[in-house]
Amino acid sequence: MTRAPDRPAETEHDAEELWEHVEGESPDTATQQALNLAHRATEKFPELVTRYRSFAGPVAIVSGALMALAGVAVARRLRKGQQPEEILEQITPEEIEQAVSVTGRQNRLLRMIRGIARRRYGADGESKDGASPSDAS
């Protein structure tokens, strides 16, 4: 039976070289602000952080899923024009956890409305009785 060759020990310098060549798109300022607020919002709720904890070897880190949920909740409030400090004061753990389900309901409602409009007005924008969508008020 042959033995596998020993791997050379990885040094700290080798690990740093791996990260030097990583390429990617850097987020714009609005995205950076939303991510920063998402991190601050999750720090506000330690019980939420413990529920979404992941273990990477011996280190416990916040799950990416929690950061994505918090990012959606924060971005939604930023789009409505709320100030960052106001968001941090008013956001709740329930809002963070339900951020995705609310989006799903909204998308379902929009799909339903578009389907009704397509059935009513068809692809050409005219209803079966000759009225256009702008006439339907």
Image (cartoon, rainbow, N blue to C red):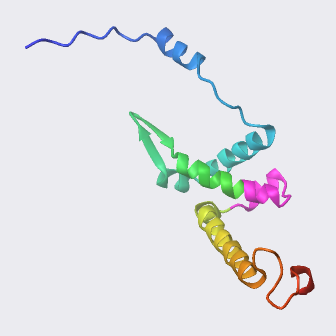
Q: Is residue 78 left or right of residue 107?
A: right
In front here: 78 or 58? Answer: 78
Instruction: Give percent across and percent down for residue 33.
Output: 77, 43
Instruction: Give percent across and percent down for residue 91.
Output: 70, 60
**Which residues lie in the magenta part?**
75-91
Residue 87 on the magenta span: yes
Outermost residue on the bottom side: it is: 129
Residue 79 on the magenta span: yes
Q: Residue at x 54, y 13 (%)?
A: 17
Please, what is the dominant secondary structure of the magenta stretch?
A: helix
Q: Residue at x 48, y 11 (%)?
A: 14
In front here: 81 or 19? Answer: 19
Q: Is residue 19 left or right of residue 38?
A: left
Q: Is residue 22 above or below residue 52?
A: above
Instruction: Give percent across and percent down for residue 73.
Output: 68, 58
Q: Is residue 3 left or right of residue 127?
A: left
Q: Quadrant of residue 55?
A: top left
Q: Residue at x 78, y 81 (%)?
A: 121
Q: Quadrant of residue 35?
A: top right
Q: Is residue 71 above or below residue 20?
A: below
Q: Is residue 87 above or below residue 106?
A: above
Instruction: Give percent across and percent down for residue 68.
Output: 60, 50
